[in-house]
Image (cartoon, rainbow, N blue to C red):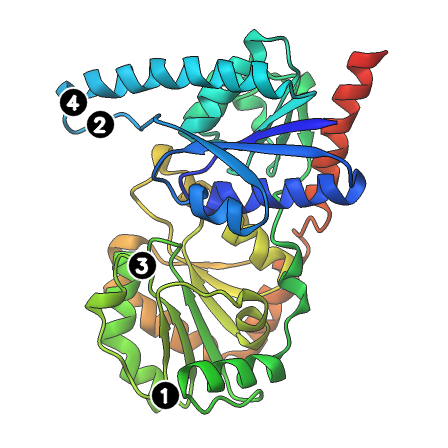
Amino acid sequence: MKYLISGGGTGGHIFPAISIANALKEQDPDAEILFVGALSRMEMERVPEAGYQIVGLPVRGFNRSQPWKNISVLFDLFRSLRQAKQIVRQFKPDVAIGVGGYASGAAMKAAAWEHIPVLLQEQNGFAGVTNKLLKNDAAKICVAYEGMERFFPKEKIILTGNPVRQNLTQGSPVAACEFFNNQFGVHFVPDRPTLLIIGGSLGARTINLSIEQGLDQFLAEGIQVIWQTGKNYFNQIQPREGVVITPFLNNMPDAYALADIVISRAGASSISELCLLGKAAILVPSPNVAEDHQTHNAMALVNRGAACIVKDKDAQSQLVSVALQLFQDNEQQQSLRKQIALLAQPDSAARIAREAQKLIKHLAE
């Protein structure tokens, strides 16, 4: 069987897409999988690193602040639709899977025009623009949150949760200390309290500024710090002895295993990983996303006592103190871990893969 998978722009789209591809390969080792991404976006690197072929489209997002620049964006959109149609005709997929992002819109639209069954995967509690535009073309829509009938036809919705990287549960605190000590020259030990900061693949300015201002307070309390700055901010931060500071964490399983508390944006993939691993988390939703969907994601956990939240505008004044208070309150840490673990959906990628295969079987009947 042939599967066309499209989406990207951020790790929040790319990692679920790769997880779905891996699940398809596990269930059908002979499957042929082709990714469609947006040229110059991070999927063009991450997907080949995962062992899959990808083709890029010139599609770009609309410029909301300078609308007059959108003439060229529209031109690239039409080029992308034409190229996507050619890709679909040449590859002849049995099913097309869209996970959101600019490229996904063009690829899924082209698949629908060629009468290829389309399955969408929506990661957020507030549906993205691309998936909302594609809802009539989709045969099935896999979602991570309840109540998505606000955005999609109820009969198409399947609650599957979000796929996460399959190796995340394989880390260990001992292996983590060995890895970070060797790679970064620190002296971490497994039984010392540890803070993990992850602001996304590009970075989170407010989180980074807050941590930079409060780093000495964490070190004074004997807290080990693993700080993923994102590639946009790494060069702006001074190296500190005894602290892991890196633009991108390639060893997330061990980083998570060692962490007692995680400070994170509230992207759908990050939240799904925190749920799967049962981590005490402080979420700082990004204000720079469509429809403020990260706040919706975060509040779905906060309302169940499964996470703490600090608003982006309050982060520089509150984030460090909230984190230090949580380190001192073991009872609250345990409660957060228990509640967030109840929200985990451990087999999401496999379930989505099975739904894609059902569409093929249904078409063949």
Which amino acid, mark 4? Lys
How many C-alpha atoms fall within 10 Å of the one at disc 4: few (<14), some, or many (≥20)?
few
**Circle nearer the N terminus (4, 3):** 4
Which amino acid, mark 2? Asn
Residue drawn at x 69%, y 27% as measured from the top left: 2
Which amino acid, mark 1? Gly
SS class, disc 2: loop
Mark 4–mark 1 CB contact (< 8 Å): no
Estimate the spatial distance between the alpha carbons at disc 4 and disc 1, rounded to whole Å.
Answer: 46 Å
Count the numbered circles shown: 4
In the rendered image, which residue does mark 3 sit on? 231
SS class, disc 4: helix
**Circle nearer the N terminus (1, 2):** 2
Estimate the spatial distance between the alpha carbons at disc 3 and disc 2, rounded to whole Å.
Answer: 23 Å
In the rendered image, which residue does mark 4 sit on? 69
**Circle nearer the N terminus (4, 1):** 4
How many C-alpha atoms fall within 10 Å of the one at disc 3: few (<14), some, or many (≥20)?
some
Is residue 165 visible from the viewing direction of this image? yes
Q: Say which quarter of the image contains residue 106.
A: top left
Which amino acid, mark 3? Lys
> Residue furthest toward the right?
365
**Circle nearer the N terminus (3, 2):** 2
Estimate the spatial distance between the alpha carbons at disc 3 and disc 1, rounded to whole Å.
Answer: 21 Å
- In this rendering, the label closer to the viewer, 3 or 2: 3
Mark 2–mark 4 CB contact (< 8 Å): yes
How many C-alpha atoms fall within 10 Å of the one at disc 2: few (<14), some, or many (≥20)?
few
Labelled disc at residue 242: 1
In the rendered image, which residue does mark 2 sit on? 63
Quadrant where the image shows the N terminus:
top right
- In this rendering, the label closer to the viewer, 4 or 1: 4
